[in-house]
Amino acid sequence: MDRFKGSIIRPWRLLFQFLGVAFLLGQSFGLPPFGTSPMLRTLFLPNASCRYVDTAPTSCFYYQFQDGMTSGASTYYVDVIVVLLIIVLMVLVLGRIWCSWLCPFGLVQEGLAYLRENLNIRPYRLKWAHRELLRPVKYVILFLTVLLSLPIGLSGLGLLGCQSTLALPFCQVCPAKGFFTVSEQLLGLEPWGTALPLLAIVSLLLFLVSSFFVKMAFCRICPMGAFMALFSRFSLMWLEKDVDKCTKCRICLRVCPVDHDRVYEDMESVDVAGSDCTLCGRCVEMCPEEGCLSLSFGPKRLASSKKPGRLGFLGMFHRKEGK
Amino acid sequence: MSRSDQEGPPRYLKDREEYFSDEQRKRTTVESRKMEKRVRENLRAQKDRPAVMKYFDDIHTYGGIRVKELKEFRKTGGKVVGTLCVMVPFELINAAGARGVRVSSGYYEPVHPANELLGDAGLCPMVKSTIGAKMVHSDPLAEEIDLLVCPATCDGKLKLAEIYEDWAPVMMMNIPRVKTGDTTSRLWMGEIKFLKQKLEELTGRKIKRKALLNEIGKWNDAQAAWGRLLEYRKSKTPPISGQDMMLIAQASQKDEITRWTKKVKDLEKELKVMVRKGLHAGETGAARIMLAGSPMIYPNFKIPSLVEESGGLIVSDELCSGHRIMSDPVMLDERSMSEMLMALAERYFFPCTCPCFSPNDDRIRRMKESIHLFGVEGVVFHTLRGCHLNNLEATKIEMKLREAEIPMIKLESEYDDGDVEQVRTRIEAFVEMIKTRRAFSVKKEGSS
Amino acid sequence: MSEPLKPYDVGIDVGAISTKVAVVDKERKLVAHGVRLTTMEPGKLARSLLDEVLKEAGVDNGQIQYIVATGQGRRSVDFADMARTEITAFSKGAYYLHPESVILIDIGGQGIRAMRRGEMGIIEDFRTNDKCSSGTGSFLDAMATALEVDIKDAGSLAVSSCGGEEVCATCTVFAESEVVSMIAKGKKKEDILAGLDKMVARKVNGLVNSMRSKGPVFIGGGVGENIGVVEELKSVANREVFVPEHPQLIGAMGAAFMAPREHEGEKEVRREEVVVKKRSFFDLFRKVKR
């Protein structure tokens, strides 16, 4: 029995994440057990697979979103709207659960953090002021993406010539692009000497270094997260806080991978997830107060915080308040 | 081990030790011993007391086994660190190979030497007693310390430590008294790192990561055991009295923690048997009382014993000599040294609802939560004379509790037995009031 | 129940200065009473006083159903059926004598107690003086002695004053020296007494105000017999002040009133059920609690 933990969420999440990422990558590489199902081909999930993998059956929604904005002027952007509507619907039901339960970026970052932890290197904690500065950055990136991809698709503006350089602006700096192009060349899936996306490689390196030292560094500026964050506060997935039980011990803030301070600060709301919480449940499993924090789907509590030393088997499906 | 042969900071009072006659020293010692014995016998006279409680009595006994153990420990080169507050991480002290003891004094007699030398000054009697005990060397436990760690919570303790410097090396810890903001955490974290450094200097060995992890584990086990004990207080007829619980909590700050945990587990087993037999502490239908306010350090158990003698039963408290000692476990996210220190620092600082902090609405909120959890019917708010912080907060708490229809009585007490009868009358009236309220509320329920 | 046979209850209030005995019937009417200074043996004193009172009233010992003791010496009354604190007893007495009053003040020999009454005569809050007995009966007694006035006349004498002196000191010892210096200056006794009464009234008024209620005041205890203090309080307090017929006996009467009610059968103790927060589907749309 681990003396430092309350309920258990993390192993479940990691399992889910591993299987999910393996499935989606298997899909995109066309590996035998996974195949390439035609259904996935029509779905554009947040970042299930990357366009820059040759065998990929599909792409992330952000690629589709940028592409559709540039090329969809003639079709009244129907493609974009459909893609975004699916995502919005998903967020409204499940919140940003994607971010910490399926996103491959998240898995990589957690792996790096795990490596760092085992090397006994302390994480670099951002100061409160810096966190506040960083908070709007993801929305700025989202906004810039729209600002760049929309006008270059409009023939009336005469910017069609820029398409070759400015199309898919975010993909050019996306670490995934850097990773997949480099790895495909290394594995020989693509011939050597094709032009390397330098910007993407630089951002890949930045991504690796920063998320090695700072927990979930990329999540703080991820524009896909920003898009989901716009709607996640209306979602049915809650991070629920029973204010009366809170002892203000600050554990939730300390263990939060994205430094979401609303969990600690907010003493009014029932749902403290807000827009930045990725619902990883770390605070729920670390909170030492019985039933203070819980992940819940609407009024249904899926997992609640427990007193350490009293953990039931399967903390994840633990139901609250027997008496 | 006195400092007389060392070069040190200027001494103000030590050279005046001759001020006190041998007769006075002796009297203080004898009186302290007598008082402790009286209180202990009073505790032992409680009805249906679990047998394991004797162990906790022995830990607290004046010059008892714990003092002997510490003496032995020091003879083998070990160091003992005294603290005055619940905000000092014992895990860190233990990880350095030292032993921690809380040396706040609850003896009545040493107040007089302190009064004689320092004047009354409207100062908190606990502070005076602690200094006085050191001045005349009347507390054997306080004689065994090599370093006093004192967080500067209130004015009394701030100056207490300064005076204490004459007899033992003192390390002050700067408590940020405003809890909001990010800087608070950083400042306190710095203090904890400084404490670590000081402890390493004292014991001459580095605090290892593994050792600290191990100690945190031990203390978390203790917390879990204590938490299970608390469950018994929630029942309609708690099998253990509030005085005993306070005694156990305070023993954790004197004892070896693994042994303490084991004994608490034994006690839990015994309580289980008691519950099955239907035995319980206090009289039937006792008023469920919560203690709040200034700390009551053993053997200053005047108020709790009065409450439990006048038909009340303490089912919960909010004291830094009670529940607050074991308020929260240390939850480790990562296990690098600085992360563990941070976890320690935050656990000892943020959940603490000492009135010395400024936005302290948490205290009221948590009192309300305890009232709800333990079925409290009335709050006895005790302030030591001169405890301005608690005195000032009392009114606000009283108002807030009244909104929740929980009566509160505020008692001011000193370190002497003179006011026992007065206080008894008030507590009895309070208990009677609670019982009539209860009868009335039952009647109202029945009629409607 | 053998109620017709035992139509009386007795309340014994063993105060710090005087012991009071009140015999009441089941209609809560005072039948007989007696007051005597408390001696070193309060138990014996109470017994003899009770016998005397009963003899005077012509009540047989067997006609008494319950004896309830109260006051600081309540524990020494060994023949009492039960003992209750003076605070509870006083509030009970005040409630049955004047149910409208909200703030109940008991100025006894050595203590001032202020209570706020809630529903059904249950006190909600109370305060007592701490260690200082200034403003109490013994304070006024000491002042009257210093002025060589009989304490029984002190009240009416003070009322006859045209303009009171100002007494600043609240401490008994300091006030006495102040009084002595006033006498030396040739001030009139009644003026000094009026000043003292004003001081006491101010002190009591401070206590009244600290009870945080605007309701009428009930005043009892030995000092309630002092008309000077009561009159001063009426002018200072700026609200209705009620003085009962026998202020000194309120505690004893209240104790007697408590008897039948307490023995109607001890109610089973029932704690309030803990209300488990129910969560409905509509909580979905209500993310903010308060």
Image (cartoon, rainbow, N blue to C red):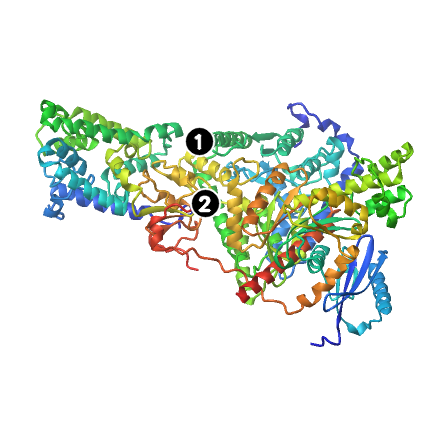
Residue designated by label 1: B182
Q: Mark 2 and mark 1, same subunit?
A: no
Q: Looking at the picture, does residue C12 appear above or below residue C59?
A: above
Depth check: give the residue in front, C115 or B377: C115
For the residue labelled by badge 1, is the local secondary structure a helix, a strand or a loop? helix
**Chain letter behind tag 2:** A
Question: Vertically, is B200 above or below B361?
Answer: above
Q: Is residue A225 above or below residue C261?
A: above
Residue B333 at least partly seen = no
Q: Give the chain letter at badge 1.
A: B
Side of C57 where A156 appears, left or right: left
Measure the alpha-carbon separation of dots 2 and 1: 19 Å
For label 2, the SS is loop
Q: Position of residue A120 (x, y in %)?
A: 37, 34
Contact flag, marks 2 and 1 (Cβ < 8 Å): no
**Horizontal and vertical percent for residue C68?**
74, 64
Please rate how many residues cluster around mark 1, counting C-alpha atoms within 10 Å: few if below 14, some from 14 to 19, many from 20: few
Q: In the rendered image, which quarter contains the N terminus of chain C? A: bottom right
Residue at mark 2: A246
In the image, residue C75 sits, relative to residue B149, either above or below, namely below
Q: Give the residue drawn at x 12%, y 47%.
A: A39
The residue drawn where x is 14% and y is 31% is: A181
Q: Nearer the viewer, residue B304 or B147?
A: B304
In the image, residue C82 lies at what x, y percent? 72, 64
- Residue B77 sits in quarter: top right
Q: Position of residue B385 (x, y in %)?
A: 68, 40
| Quarter holding residue C24 | bottom right
